[in-house]
Image (cartoon, rainbow, N blue to C red):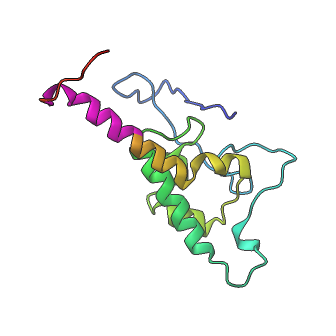
Amino acid sequence: MAKTVTLASLSEPSESGVREEKVNTDWKLCLFCQLKTNKPLTDPTNNYKKSYDTNRTYQELSRTIQTLSDLNALPSYVDVNRMDNDDGIEINLDINKAKWHKTWFAACNSQKVERALKKRKLQTCDQFSYLSPVKKMLR
C-alpha cells in the first residue's frame, strides 16, 4: 500500500502551520500506487484491438475518480490532486498516457461508485428517519 507524504516547510507556514507541497506523478509508474513492482502495468494506448477507444477509458476513469472523491469513498492511497494539474484529470491521464496495475484499478471501478452512492443514500435516509410518521413494530 502506498504511503501519503506531507512535506513540511519552515518558510511560509499556512494557517495550520504545515505547508503541503504537491507531489509530482511519475507517469511511467502505476497511476495509483506510484511503486516500481514486477507486476505488469495496463496501458490502454497499447491495446491490440483497433476499435478500442483510449479516450473513453481515460474519460470513464477520471469520472469515476472524481465521483469517488466527491463522495469521500476514494481509497486512501489515491491522491486526486496529484493527478490534476489544473487542466483536469482526464486531460492529464490522456496526455501522459497513464498506466496502472489491475489490482489498483479494480478499487476505482463503476461498481465502487454504485456502492458509495447507495451507502450515501442509506446514510441520508437514516438521518431523516425520525421524521417518518410510521412506527416500527417490535417483536
- Judge by depth and name the residue closer to the eye, 134 or 130: 134
Is residue 127 within the magenta segment? yes
Q: Is residue 126 left or right of residue 109?
A: left
Quarter holding residue 58: bottom right
Quadrant holding the C terminus? top left
- Judge by depth and name the residue closer to the eye, 53 or 118: 118
- For this orientation, the residue located farthest to the front is 139
Is residue 59 within the magenta segment? no
Q: Position of residue 8 (x, y in %)?
A: 53, 26
Q: Main secondary structure of the magenta part?
A: helix
- For this orientation, the residue located farthest to the top is 139
Read off the magenta span. Answer: 119-132
Q: Residue at x 55, y 30 (%)?
A: 6
Q: Is residue 119 left or right of residue 137?
A: right
Q: Residue at x 16, y 29 (%)?
A: 134
Q: Is residue 34 above or below residue 61?
A: above
Q: Position of residue 16 (x, y in %)?
A: 37, 23
Quadrant holding the N terminus? top right
Q: Give the tally of numbered discs.
A: 0
Q: Is residue 102 above or below residue 18?
A: below
Q: Is residue 74 above or below residue 111?
A: above
Q: Residue at x 33, y 41 (%)?
A: 121
Q: Position of residue 76 (x, y in %)?
A: 56, 34
Is residue 71 visible to us here?
Answer: no
Quarter holding residue 100: bottom right
